[in-house]
């Protein structure tokens, strides 16, 4: 049976049928999925039953290399999932208890993920695909929105294209979560030191220009901070216009995969003090920095020398 792709939005996203991603897939099927990702940027696989950890890891690895482990903010009661390759995108502590309102993981992820972002843009080597599987869904709210950064570039005014095409930004979780008032430890300030990313990049699969935006972007190299933040806000408002955004309403068993090189996303709010929401993510790496390591040193050293300044910058 051949794969079929049914568009879910005029600009991006399609539902994929004709494959059971819980079973090993062939190289030909993997190629078809990658081709569809280059076209649609977001693919929805509806199964009705969540993938096991082993199934999700096997499917994701059939499409590329997993990201290596990295520093995460964990619930104060400890880690809930038993495999570090899975990111716990939930409001749950061990024992599947709902996180307290002031839990640092809740504030960092459940609240922070409501900002538009691109996964791992705060890493020197950013993310390629993210694959998120739904295990428990609240009765209302908790949808995920996706915005197409290639369409955002295509519809940008010529004067802005010329203005931004060669700019370099600095990304850090200090900027995104700091803007919400999140308090970092001294060690976290070092671990989350900014990295540099191009503001515009060429999407490798489609060959199209793509804006590299994220709430993690908090500076533009060589620009005063207020001017940089205003331009980034202007670009984000443009890129997240309703006509460029697909909103996914989750069902248990859904696996949604998106290309971080072509999209931004955010979760919508839900009553996380009342209802559990349990989704689990695997993430593929692009395998190479978007900006060479030799040009990264300035950003990291500046952050390590001026921790308090970094937080001030993020919250302006």
Image (cartoon, grey):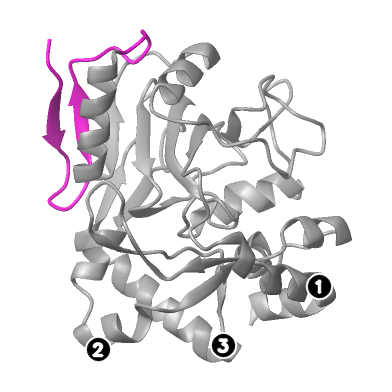
Of tags 3 and 2, which is closer to the observer?
3
User: Which quarter of the figure is the N terminus placed in?
Assistant: top left
Q: At which x and y percent is residue 134?
A: 44, 27
Could you say whether the residue bearing mark 3 is in a helix, strand or loop?
Answer: loop
Residue 159 is marked as 2
Residue 307 is marked as 1
- Classify residue 237 by image quadrant: bottom left
Residue 222 is marked as 3
Along the polypeptide, which appears first: circle 1 or circle 2?
A: 2
Is the residue marked by circle 1 packed among few (<14), some (14-19), or many (20+) residues within 10 Å? Answer: some
User: Which quarter of the figure is the C terminus placed in?
Assistant: bottom right
Q: At which x and y percent is residue 44?
A: 28, 31
The range drawn in magenta is 1-25
Residue ID at (25%, 69%): 153
Along the polypeptide, which appears first: circle 1 or circle 3?
A: 3
Residue 101 visible in this rendered orientation of the protein: no
Residue ID at (85%, 59%): 185
Could you say whether the residue bearing mark 2 is in a helix, strand or loop?
Answer: helix
How would you classify the magenta stretch by its main secondary structure?
A: loop
Does the magenta run of residues contain 23? yes
Q: Is residue 288 left or right of residue 3?
A: right
Of tags 1 and 3, which is closer to the observer?
3
């Amino acid at each position: 049976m051949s794969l079929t792709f049914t568009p879910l939005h005029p600009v991006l996203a399609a539902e994929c049928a004709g494959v059971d991603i819980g079973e090993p897939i062939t190289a030909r099927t993997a190629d078809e999925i990658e081709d569809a990702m280059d076209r649609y940027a977001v693919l929805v696989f509806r199964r009705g039953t969540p993938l096991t950890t082993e199934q999700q890891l096997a499917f994701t690895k059939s499409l590329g290399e997993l990201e290596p482990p990295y520093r995460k903010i964990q619930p104060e009661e400890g880690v809930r999932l038993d495999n570090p390759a899975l990111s716990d995108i939930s409001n749950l502590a061990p024992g599947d208890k709902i996180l307290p309102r002031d839990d640092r993981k809740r504030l960092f992820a459940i609240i922070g993920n409501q900002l538009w972002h691109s996964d791992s843009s705060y890493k020197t080597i950013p993310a390629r695909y993210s694959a998120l599987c739904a295990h428990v869904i609240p009765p209302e709210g908790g949808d995920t929105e996706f915005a197409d950064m290639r369409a955002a570039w295509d519809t940008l005014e010529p004067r802005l294209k010329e203005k931004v095409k060669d700019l370099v930004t600095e990304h850090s979780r200090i900027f995104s979560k700091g803007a919400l008032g999140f308090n970092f430890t001294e060690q976290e300030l070092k671990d989350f030191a900014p990295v540099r990313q191009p503001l515009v990049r060429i999407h490798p699969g489609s060959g199209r220009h793509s804006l590299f935006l994220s709430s993690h972007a908090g500076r533009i190299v060589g620009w005063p901070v207020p001017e940089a933040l205003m331009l980034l806000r202007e670009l984000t408002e443009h890129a997240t216009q309703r006509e460029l955004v697909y909103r996914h309403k989750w069902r248990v068993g859904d696996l949604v995969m998106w290309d971080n090189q072509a999209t931004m996303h955010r979760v919508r709010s839900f009553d996380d003090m009342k209802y559990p929401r349990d989704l689990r993510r695997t993430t593929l790496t692009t395998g190479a920095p978007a900006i060479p390591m030799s040009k990264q040193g300035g950003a990291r050293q500046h952050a390590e020398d001026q921790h308090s300044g970094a937080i001030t910058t993020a919250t302006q």
